[in-house]
Amino acid sequence: MQKQPALVLPGAVQMRIKSSQNSSGERLSQTKSMVLPEPDTLQKPTVLKGEYLNKAKIAEGGKKLRKNWTSTWVVLCSNQLLFYKESKQEAVANLKPGGKADGVDLCGAIIEWTTEKSSRKNVVQITTLTGQEFLLQADHFPTICKWHDALKKAVDSLSSGPGGKSCGRVALNRSNSTECLPRPTCEATKPKPKETKSEHRRSIMFKLNYSASDSADKNGVKNRLKKFISRRPSMKTLQEKGLIKDRVFGCHMLTLCEREGTTVPRFVKLCVDEVEKRGLEADGIYRVSGNLAVIQKLRFLVDQEEELDLGDSQWEDIHVITGALKMFFRELPEPLFPFRFFDLFVEAIKIKEPTQKVQAMKKLIHQLPKPNHNTMKLLFHHLRRLLTKSKENLMSTQGISIVFGPTLMWPEFESGNMEVNMVYQNQIVESILIECVEIFGPGGM
């Protein structure tokens, strides 16, 4: 007679089978354990001794966090990754009690290399089932590679071997055994709907038709694009029709003067005339900034080549006009002092003998292209007249040179000390301002 199997809970299932004699006359008097999964799924728990790694937590419950890298003592224990502020040896040495560790449950976690979440090299991303995301990094690649492999192994062992309820398994371990039986999920047990023959045939026919017409469609699109590009009007035609207007701000000095048929841009003349009408005595003229929104509005109107009256009430603030003039010079693709002359002017300003210095500067200025030379002459004579009202406007030669030094000249490539270059820029503008009459002759444009 066969005894009823005894059920032992929790965590183990045993069946004790005792039989006096079977049909063939053999006698069984032993205890057999029921093995639920495959025997080769039994894996040793993955353990990795502690090591200092750089750690950053970037998400909590699916919500992104600000990335903050810290050096952390990391320990891998079977199904958990533990983070300590310092190793146990250091804690003992510093007479500190063992600190609590932050644990990360690796059950169902995703371990992957990442280059998008950080600019650092050798970064591993850990994403848990609860929506936590961590980054681990080490400068030494073999070190982080070892941790990546160990974490992968730990996650794989949890998903296929001994696990807990957090992995979606029921632990059915026998006594003296650690195997578990995966709980079947709804998706695994749900029968997949069979695709009918008619639907299958229809999908195949669609693919065949699509592949046959695909190349023809591509050729058609290419031909249409070629026709469109060949019929596209040239830039010159669009400009002649007024569809595209040439800009004033950001346009090369030579191009702008050639287009306007002058040697000094009209906008520069308009600004200089308006400042001399009503702004020579304004406190901090050229030093005080105007309203940027109004300056941008003025710039837009100038670029649209609309009729411009700087005496209009909307330009009542003279600092808006001076601000727009400075913006015009700053946005030139090549400064008023051309790039090829920058080093030459710096060498000239280093000359200690005053007369030789002035003559060297004068020679260089007269070598400039005509639009640059004439615009410079108009501007510096204007600034000289502004200095005659220095008691009212509180502007000095040095103050003007500080404003216009970096506005009128800068090197093509920032090679060297920017502060030193700025000193030379200011000195060059100040020297030309002082010797304006000697260099350009009397009067203005």
Image (cartoon, rainbow, N blue to C red):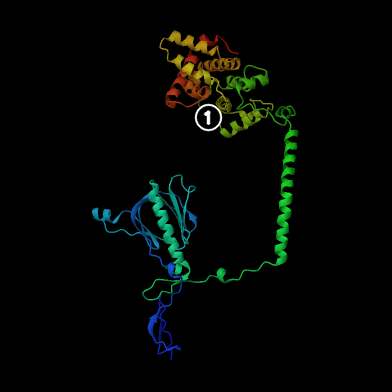
Which of these two is toward me, 389 or 267? Answer: 267
Spot occupied by residue 387 in the image (x, y as percentages of width and height): 50, 17
Q: What element carries label 1?
A: loop
Q: From the image, which quarter does the N terminus lie in? A: bottom left
Does 431 sit above or below residue 48? above
In the picture provided, is 180 more to the left or to the right than 328?
A: left
Spot occupied by residue 273 in the image (x, y as percentages of width and height): 61, 19
Q: Tell me the kind of residue under disc 1.
A: Ser
**Does the rendering let one see residue 285?**
no
Spot occupied by residue 129 in the image (x, y as percentages of width and height): 48, 61
Q: From the image, which quarter does the C terminus lie in? A: top right
Residue highlighted by disc 1: 289
Residue visible at 57% across and 28% down in the picture: 320
Which of these two is toward me, 351 or 280? Answer: 351
Which of these two is toward me, 324 or 317? Answer: 324
**Does the rendering let one see residue 151?**
yes
